[in-house]
Image: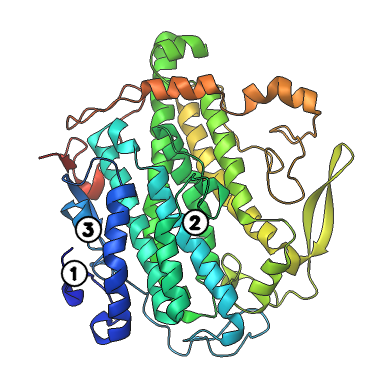
């Protein structure tokens, strides 16, 4: 394994070359990272030249440099947003005090856990998506997949940087463990369940990048408020990259819808069987995929009442989404929040202390945000003159975490019997045969400018390149 010139090979704005201890730690971690990438990164793609965006600095000119890169040679860099002078903690019990430039001893264990949990999702998604390159619907989409993958790799670097720099030996051990867990593996799975689900096809990938990368956005936004300044600055920069991942999801689903509607109009039918025979994904199947990804993703926010969430907030580790824009006292000791509970066969609202409900607060903010894209998808359907509308399911639907776990609730929010659930679940969640059908559409389209039959071409290319640009060269 070649050694690295840190001043050039790892673009960074953290003075890597001047911190010998950190440099040595990363020198030991880097070959293990590359061997993880070789084993678990995109399948069979190591020799391809991919038209990728690489961040070489955090300013507007530097963070989106486009060029052909072989992915194992991608320059995974370490970037923090510039420090804000005299930054103060702006929520929790330490509100008004100076932000921390180092980790206070009493918060060390919790901060480590937060960083490791975030860090674990990054390689997990690369593992979940590693076979998708073999069935890409176009070179444009293949390139977008690889872009997401290398940036999730960079996000792992971002978290490992914090672990190595601020958590000593414990941090180095966590850095190794992040390369050892495997998505979906029985003995050593990834930490969060949604990151152990397979991403078997491109419809799942688009739903994942729309819904689950958006969970990433909300977690990162909450951490961007942190009193631990290096964490806040790291996550702020990660958010600039996250936006593209959600774009890939939103535009991907939108193009699937567009193509389906086109064929619906050509054939004058909404019969799923006829549409499937024509090789496109019928809208009810899209709705079932949406239901699945939405429900699995909102579980990621955790239990609706959580004393950990209260501790993380009060001690300044993790804020709310857009904490700075809120007009309350940012301590929340006397505030309440309404959460959903089940009483008999009804869902009822119950007021609880807001500090304990902060997972629910973040989940509700997430839900508001994710509904936006769904209404943009509906515009595509509306424009095609078709009456069908997609919607996000009720937040109590298909939940596995918190007080709603285990309750059977329909997508429209009715508590239903086990019997009704069994009878109707095939209308609500993707069935084996839905998944088999979607899988049957997945073939590899690699001619520049050609797109698989089930998805419309994008409106514009990447970095103002045409849509028939050679985004990936196979050599
Ligand atoms: Fe990420
Ligand atoms: Fe992401």
**Distance between mark 2 and mark 1 Cα atoms:** 27 Å
Near mark 2 (Cα within 10 A), the count class, few <14, some 14-19 or many ≥20, is many
Dot 1 corresponds to which residue? 9
Ligand 2 contact, mark 2 (Cβ < 8 Å): yes
**Distance between mark 3 and mark 2 Cα atoms:** 22 Å
Dot 2 corresponds to which residue? 216
**Distance between mark 3 and mark 1 Cα atoms:** 9 Å
Q: Earlier in the sequence, mark 3 or mark 2?
A: 3
Dot 3 corresponds to which residue? 74
| Depth order, front residue of 79/422 | 422
Near mark 3 (Cα within 10 A), the count class, few <14, some 14-19 or many ≥20, is some
Q: Earlier in the sequence, mark 2 or mark 1?
A: 1
Secondary element under disc 2, as helix, strand or loop, is helix
Relative to residue 448, is residue 211 depicted above or below?
below
In the rendered image, which quarter contains the C terminus? top left
Residue 63 percent across, percent down from the top left: 27, 65
In the rendered image, which quarter contains the N terminus? bottom left
Instruction: Describe residue 333's horizontal placement relative to residue 158 as left or right.
Output: right
In percent of the image, x 24 and y 40: which residue is there? 44
In percent of the image, x 45 and y 31: which residue is there? 380
Instruction: Describe residue 410's horizontal placement relative to residue 44 as left or right.
Output: right
Residue, far right: 344
In percent of the image, x 24 and y 28: which residue is there? 445
């Amino acid at each position: 394994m070649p050694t690295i010139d840190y001043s050039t090979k790892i673009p960074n704005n953290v003075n890597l070359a001047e911190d010998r201890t950190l440099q040595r730690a990363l020198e030991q971690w880097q070959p293990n990272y590359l061997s993880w990438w070789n084993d678990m990164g995109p399948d069979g793609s190591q020799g391809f030249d991919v038209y990728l965006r690489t961040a070489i600095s955090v300013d507007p000119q530097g963070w989106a440099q486009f060029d052909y890169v072989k992915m194992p040679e991608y320059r995974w860099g370490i970037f923090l947003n510039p420090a804000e002078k005299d930054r103060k903690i702006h929520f929790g019990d330490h509100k008004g005090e100076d932000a921390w430039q180092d980790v206070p001893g009493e918060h060390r264990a919790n901060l480590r856990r937060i960083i490791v949990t975030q860090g674990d999702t990054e390689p997990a998604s690369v593992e979940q998506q590693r076979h998708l390159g073999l069935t890409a619907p176009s070179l444009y989409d293949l390139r977008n997949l690889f872009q997401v993958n290398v940036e999730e790799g960079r996000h792992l670097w971002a978290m490992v940087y914090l672990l190595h720099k601020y958590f000593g030996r414990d941090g180095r051990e966590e850095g190794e463990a992040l390369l050892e867990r495997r998505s979906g593996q029985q003995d050593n799975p990834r930490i969060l369940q949604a990151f152990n689900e397979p991403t078997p096809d491109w419809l799942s990938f688009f739903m994942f990048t729309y819904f689950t990368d958006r969970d990433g956005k909300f977690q990162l936004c909450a951490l961007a408020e942190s009193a631990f300044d290096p964490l806040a600055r790291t996550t702020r920069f990660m958010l600039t990259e996250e936006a593209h991942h959600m774009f890939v999801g939103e535009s991907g689903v939108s193009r699937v819808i567009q193509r389906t509607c086109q064929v619906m109009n050509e054939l004058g039918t909404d019969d799923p069987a006829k549409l499937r025979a024509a090789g496109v994904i019928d809208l009810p199947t899209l709705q079932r995929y949406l239901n699945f990804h939405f429900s699995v993703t909102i579980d990621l926010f955790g239990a609706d009442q959580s004393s950990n969430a209260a501790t993380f907030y009060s001690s300044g580790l993790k804020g709310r989404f857009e904490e700075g824009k809120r007009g309350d006292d940012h301590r929340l000791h006397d505030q309440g929040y309404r959460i959903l509970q089940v009483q008999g066969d009804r869902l009822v609202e119950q007021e609880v202390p807001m500090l304990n409900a902060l997972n629910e607060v973040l989940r509700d903010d997430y839900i508001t945000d994710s509904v936006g894209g769904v209404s943009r998808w509906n515009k595509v359907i509306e424009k095609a003159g078709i009456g069908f509308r997609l919607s996000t399911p009720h937040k109590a639907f298909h939940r596995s975490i918190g007080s709603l776990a285990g309750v059977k609730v329909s997508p429209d929010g009715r508590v239903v019997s086990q019997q009704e659930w069994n009878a109707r679940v095939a209308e609500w969640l993707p069935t084996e045969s839905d998944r088999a059908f979607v899988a049957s559409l997945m073939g590899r389209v690699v001619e520049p400018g050609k797109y698989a039959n089930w998805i419309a071409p994008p409106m514009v290319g990447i970095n103002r390149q045409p849509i028939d640009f050679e985004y990936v060269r196979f050599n």
